[in-house]
Image (tube, rainbow, N blue to C red):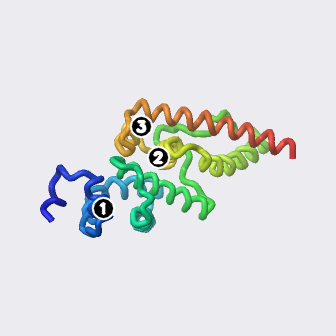
Amino acid sequence: MSFLTTTTTTDQDLVNLYLKGNEEALSQLVTRHKSKIYTSIYLLVKDEYLAEDIFQDTFIKVIKTLRAGRYNDEGKFLPWVLRIAHNLVIDYFRREKRSPTIINSDGFDIFDVLGIHDESMEELMIKEQTYTDLRKLIHFLPSEQKEVLIMRHYGELSFKEIADLTNVSINTALGRMRYALTNLRKMLLGNKEVTLKM
């Protein structure tokens, strides 16, 4: 028991203890990371009850994955759990067919980055379609790019907060965002071409 409460115990130590049948180890992991994980979910969904539900679903999935022996992100427990949480948030938005606000506190609109303007009724219709397409295409991004995009535009986190939450440098977070936007732009253009052919 005293082993679990020491600050030198790593996440991986606790995962290994849990896999050997020590339930207290999982409790310690939850206690250690609850604040970061819950906050990152809440910043995306902006609803404390929903955030709590998704937090619980996240750890149900964590437990199932650990028990099935499918956990292989040794030494990266928190980023792994955050990815699970953010994927569950994305699933929720997809099920609800809704999306959080696209413009964040900096007044930065993702559609400006993608070069879409609403100058006419036709443009508005295109924008609405693109908005729907965009939400679908986000799921095809590599997980690191998807994570940064969602945390930045949906969660309105700063790049420093994203870097801290995902345990990477600010430059890495910025780079992932650039790649995400580039990939989305390419996919959107590809989708338009497909639509035109049909």
Secondary structure at badge 1 equals helix
SS under mark 2 = helix
- Report the residue at 33% width, 47% height from top: 75
Q: Which residue is mark 1?
A: 30
Residue at horizontal 12%, vertical 62%?
Answer: 2
Task: Please report whichever mark, 3 or 2, sits nearer to the chain's N-terminal start.
Answer: 2
Q: Are marks 3 and 2 in contact (CB under 8 Å)?
A: no
In terms of image quadrants, where is residue 15?
Answer: bottom left
Q: Residue 9: percent from the left, percent from the top?
A: 20, 53
2 or 1: tag closer to the N-terminus: 1
Residue type highlighted by circle 1 = Val
How packed mark 2 is, by other alpha carbons closer than 10 Å (few <14, some 14-19, many 20 or more), is many
The mark that comes first in sequence, 3 or 1, is 1
Q: Is residue 104 visible?
A: no
Tag 3's secondary structure?
helix
Residue 46 at x, y percent in the picture: 45, 58
Q: Nearer the viewer, residue 91 or 75?
A: 75
Residue nearest the observer in this picture, 82 or 95: 82
Query: x%, y% of residue 87?
Result: 51, 55
Q: Quadrant of residue 61?
A: bottom left
Callout in the foreground (2, 1): 1
Work out whether residue 75 or residue 128 is closer to the camera in this orientation and state it: 75
Residue 159 — which label?
3
Q: Quadrant of residue 27?
A: bottom left
The tag on residue 103 is none
Q: Specify the amino acid type for callout 2.
A: Met
Residue drawn 60% across the image and 47% down it: 138
Q: Given the current orientation, which residue lies at the most extreme left position?
A: 2
Q: Amino acid at mark 3?
A: Phe
Marker disc for residue 151 = 2
Q: In the figure, 115 relative to 144: above or below?
A: above
Quadrant the N terminus occupies:
bottom left
